[in-house]
């Protein structure tokens, strides 16, 4: 709703000129803004009773101003004391909001007659000077249904003669009043109880006022019923409608034949606002054809006329003369409506209306200043930094006849001027023409003079005071302040004193100090002296460097400040002992670990820095086997370690820092040697590969013959022993069996052949990655007796060494394992392999059987030739318990 201000009543030719001016403004916007020659009008429409903070409109947006311009726009109200009762203005955007006082249309526009609009007028300045404009803001306040109808009195009395005819109409003069207007005003009336005798009708007069009329619907008889009491209800047109009620008492009276009548029912009177008290305004004339008491007429005001209006305009009851009883305030009211009744005995009152129009009278000419710059008691304050053409004040000439020619000018020396502010009439703008300099002149005395053609001169005096600006910020002697302090300082330790200077004068040059938002709370700064202190003890290990900002601010307006940086370095003290990461260390090392190999690392820390944090390590329990790297903490053994000689080593390692005095700590280090399978099983029985044992042919199958007993110096799985027969020689195949766990050799079947039978037994552990083993020859001499010892020994000497046998069978086993690993276990290949092996085994068994048969026959022949007559020596046998596997800790 933004348009250039124009007079709606001007001729059409002026409207065309305005249109041309608007076009020129669009084509040349910069020149229009630079000379401040145009005023603008903005119209807004709101409803009354809006809450505080409701947006009315945005002047900047409606005027299509670039609010991002630099310097920014500022908006201000001309008459703040009056305007801010109802609205508040945002200085940066020009947004208008409702203020704390709700706008009540009935209170704001109390003098407006029915049908007239309600307006709130504001003057808004747009600054700074390069954008300066005067904006006329017109706010239309629309009515809402916030008032219910009310009757002037809670009880209305109506007198009706008993001879009133059916359909006779009687006006209810005390009609309801509703401050709202239009549809929200009173729209109709009705009765709560009409007794079947009365009804209501509503008439609208020339002033569009509604008057209820009581209509008699049946004959009245005062002797039968002299009084009727009911309620009259007034209803407005709101949604929902609001109601007002009053008690209506209808009295039935005796009547005469005639009633008074006014010669003129509507009288228009115009008086001047400066009319004197007691002036005769008008005289009302009413007549009654009756005579005597029935013709007596009494003039009274209707109940519609407020009491203060009755007191202002006196009505003589007998003569009907109306006189001015007081002083008229033309600022409050411009129009009065007086309703006068002419009462006769037993008659319906005659009604006449007097319309009083007040002509405002101009007072003496005057100059009304409206200051844009700050003003107090006639002294205007301007900053020395204000640019040229800064607006200072508006001057309005009041009570000036439109036909008069007025000359308004400035009577003073200095960089100021007064010029008409078009298109407004009698409006003048005072502004600067150059920059002000406080050091050159601090005060100017100005006089605005207005003179007419008759020589009438009006003056208004005021003083312009130049204000010194705070245009210098404080400066630190050093913008970066590096400080040092040892840790474990005492509380409230002094750090330094800040010093900054400001070239401004008076309070604008006074400096105070403050800590920046990044400064920790442990620091304190005296605002006036600049003394910086630390309130608590510092720990370098917790934080070594504190970096924060400090500021210096002057006392000017607006404040200017400068920022400096403080860097506080906390120096180390030897207040921390070395600390091992573990309470104790345990390292597991395989035996036979190479000499000077890394066993483990002892990690140690010291929170201090520099030489206070340099830590050296040493073994303090006198071990000659181990050494430790003092710098890295690496533990090493000088020579390979053998678990079988010693399985555990306990060391005490001390860490000492380089501080003065030094600090230390001691930790326990346990080195546990892990077993390595480096010992093959040791066969304790039989003690020799040349020993043998006599087995009687009559020995029953299942009989335990002897056992192989071996031990292993290793531990764990490396010491678990398993026994197996890897070669058989002599005797029937499969005659003997050995328990893999105990080494117990048992006879499986009955012995048939005689002679020497030898078993190559393999004793193997379960070590990883490869098991170790030993072999032993177990010989059995199957016979009833041993008659020839040398014969048996001769047989034993012919047996091959077990090492050769072991080597052959070991290769065979490894080859078999390798073959099994190379060939996948596929069913077809497995079946073919089984068939080949079976065929080969059959051939071997047949060959062995033939060989044994021949050898047996040959032995029999020898035995017959050389009988075995030997004495049986004591057989070598060692009864042993089953070997038990012992696991090392």
Image (cartoon, grey):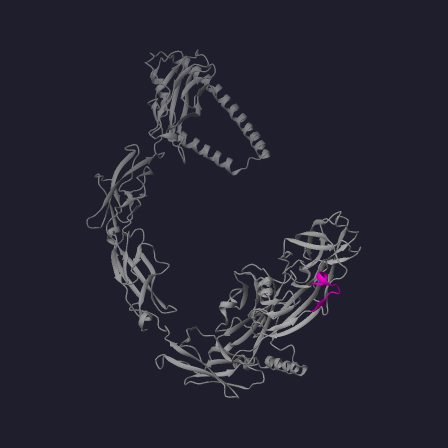
Relative image position of residue 412 (x, y in whole percent): 42, 85
Taking depth in this image into account, of 689 and 302 the one nearest to the observer is 302
Q: Is residue 91 visible?
A: no
Query: In the rendered image, which quarter contains the N terminus?
Result: bottom right
Whether residue 175 appears in magenta in the rendering, the answer is no
Q: In this picture, is 303 found above or below 391?
A: above
Left or right for 106, reference 79: right
Taking depth in this image into account, of 761 and 532 the one nearest to the observer is 532
Q: In this picture, is 829 found above or below 166?
A: above
Residue 214: quadrant of the picture: bottom right
Q: Can residue 399 be seen in this view?
A: yes
Relative image position of residue 496 (x, y in whole percent): 26, 61
Residue range of the region highlighted in magenta in the rendering: 285-296
Task: Residue at the far front: name it.
Answer: 292
Relative image position of residue 549 (x, y in whole percent): 34, 62
Relative image position of residue 178 (x, y in whole percent): 64, 59
Left or right for 368, reference 566: right
Residue 722: quadrant of the picture: top left
Residue drawn 21% across the image and 39% down it: 622
Taking depth in this image into account, of 184 and 721 the one nearest to the observer is 184
Query: In the rendered image, which quarter contains the C terminus?
Result: top left
Tell me how many marks there are: 0
Whether residue 287 appears in magenta in the rendering, the answer is yes
Taking depth in this image into account, of 149 and 834 the one nearest to the observer is 149
Left or right for 377, reference 585: right
């Amino acid at each position: 709703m933004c348009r250039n201000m124009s007079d709606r009543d001007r001729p059409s030719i002026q409207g065309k000129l305005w249109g041309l001016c608007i076009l020129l403004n669009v084509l040349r916007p910069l020149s229009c803004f630079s000379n401040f020659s145009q005023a603008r009008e903005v119209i807004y429409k709101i409803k009354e009773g809006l809450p505080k903070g409701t947006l009315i409109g945005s002047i900047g947006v409606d005027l299509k101003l670039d609010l991002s311009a630099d310097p920014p726009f500022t908006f201000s109200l001309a008459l703040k004391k009056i305007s801010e009762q109802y609205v508040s203005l945002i200085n940066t955007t020009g947004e208008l909001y409702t203020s704390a006082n709700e706008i009540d249309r009935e209170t704001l526009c109390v003098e407006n007659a029915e049908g007239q609009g309600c307006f709130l007028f504001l003057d808004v300045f747009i600054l700074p000077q390069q954008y300066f404009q005067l904006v006329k803001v017109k706010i239309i306040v629309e009515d809402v249904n916030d008032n219910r109808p009310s009757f002037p009195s809670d009880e209305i009395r109506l007198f009706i003669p008993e001879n009133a005819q059916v359909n006779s109409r009687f006006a209810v003069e005390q009609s309801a009043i509703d401050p709202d207007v239009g549809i929200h005003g009173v729209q109709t009336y009705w009765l709560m109880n009409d007794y079947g005798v009365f009804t209501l009708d509503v008439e609208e007069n020339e002033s569009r006022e509604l008057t209820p009329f009581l209509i008699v619907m049946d004959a009245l008889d005062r002797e039968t019923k002299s009084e009727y009491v009911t309620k009259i209800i007034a209803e407005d047109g709101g949604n929902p409608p609001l109601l007002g009620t009053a008690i209506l008492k209808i009295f039935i009276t005796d009547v005469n034949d005639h009633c008074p009548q006014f010669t003129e029912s509507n009288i228009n009177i115009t008086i001047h606002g400066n009319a004197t008290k007691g002036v005769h305004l008008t005289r009302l004339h009413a007549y009654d054809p009756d005579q005597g008491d029935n013709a007596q007429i009494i003039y009274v005001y209707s109940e519609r006329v407020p009491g203060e209006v009755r007191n202002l305009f006196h009505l003589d009851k007998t003569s009907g003369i109306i006189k001015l009883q007081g002083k008229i305030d033309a600022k409050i009211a411009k129009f009065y409506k007086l309703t006068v009744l002419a009462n006769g005995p037993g008659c319906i009152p005659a009604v006449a209306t007097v319309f009083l129009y007040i002509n405002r009278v101009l007072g003496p000419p005057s100059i009304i200043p409206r200051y844009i710059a700050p003003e107090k008691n006639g002294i205007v304050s301007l900053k020395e930094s204000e640019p040229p053409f800064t607006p200072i004040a508006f001057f309005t000439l009041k009570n000036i006849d439109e036909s008069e020619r007025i000359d308004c000018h400035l009577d003073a020396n200095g960089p100021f001027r007064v010029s008409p502010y078009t298109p407004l009439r009698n409006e003048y703008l005072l502004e600067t023409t150059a920059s002000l300099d406080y050091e050159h002149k601090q005060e100017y005395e100005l006089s605005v003079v207005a003179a007419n053609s008759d020589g009438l001169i009006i003056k208004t005096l005021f003083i312009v005071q130049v204000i010194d600006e705070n245009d210098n910020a404080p400066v630190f002697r050093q913008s970066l302040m590096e400080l040092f302090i040892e840790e474990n300082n005492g509380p409230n330790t002094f750090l330094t004193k800040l010093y900054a200077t400001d070239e401004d004068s008076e309070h604008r040059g006074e400096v105070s100090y403050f800590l920046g938002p990044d400064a920790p709370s442990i620091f304190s700064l005296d605002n006036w002296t600049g003394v910086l202190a630390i309130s608590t003890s510092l720990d370098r290990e917790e934080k070594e460097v504190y970096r924060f900002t400090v500021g210096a601010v002057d006392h000017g307006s607006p404040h200017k400040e400068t920022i400096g940086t403080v860097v506080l370095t906390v120096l180390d003290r030897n207040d921390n002992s070395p600390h091992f990461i573990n309470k104790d260390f345990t390292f597991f090392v395989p035996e036979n670990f190479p000499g000077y190999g890394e066993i483990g690392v002892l990690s140690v820390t010291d929170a201090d820095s520099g030489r206070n944090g340099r830590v050296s390590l040493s073994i303090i329990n006198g071990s000659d086997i181990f050494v430790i790297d003092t710098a890295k903490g690496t533990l090493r053994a000088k020579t390979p370690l053998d678990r079988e000689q010693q399985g555990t080593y306990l060391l005490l390692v001390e860490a000492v820092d380089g501080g003065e005095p030094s600090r230390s700590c001691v930790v326990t280090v346990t080195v546990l040697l892990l077993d390595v399978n480096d010992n093959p099983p040791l066969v304790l029985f039989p003690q020799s590969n040349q020993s043998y044992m006599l087995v009687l042919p009559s020995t029953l199958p299942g009989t335990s013959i002897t056992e192989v007993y071996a031990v292993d110096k290793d531990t764990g799985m490396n010491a678990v022993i398993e026994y197996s027969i890897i070669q058989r020689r002599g005797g029937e195949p499969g005659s003997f069996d050995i328990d893999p766990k105990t080494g117990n050799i048992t006879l499986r079947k009955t012995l048939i052949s005689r002679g020497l039978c030898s078993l190559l037994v393999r004793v193997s552990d379960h070590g990883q990655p490869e098991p170790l083993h030993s072999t032993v020859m177990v010989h059995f001499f199957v016979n009833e007796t041993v008659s020839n010892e040398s014969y048996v020994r001769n047989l034993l000497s012919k047996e091959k060494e077990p090492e050769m046998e072991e080597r052959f069978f070991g290769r065979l086993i490894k080859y078999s394992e390798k073959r099994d690993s190379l060939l996948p276990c596929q069913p077809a290949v497995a079946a073919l392999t089984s068939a080949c092996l079976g065929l080969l085994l059959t051939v071997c068994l047949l060959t062995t059987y033939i060989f044994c048969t021949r050898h047996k026959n040959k032995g029999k022949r020898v035995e017959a030739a050389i009988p075995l007559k030997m004495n049986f020596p004591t057989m070598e046998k060692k009864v042993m318990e089953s070997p038990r596997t012992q696991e090392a800790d």
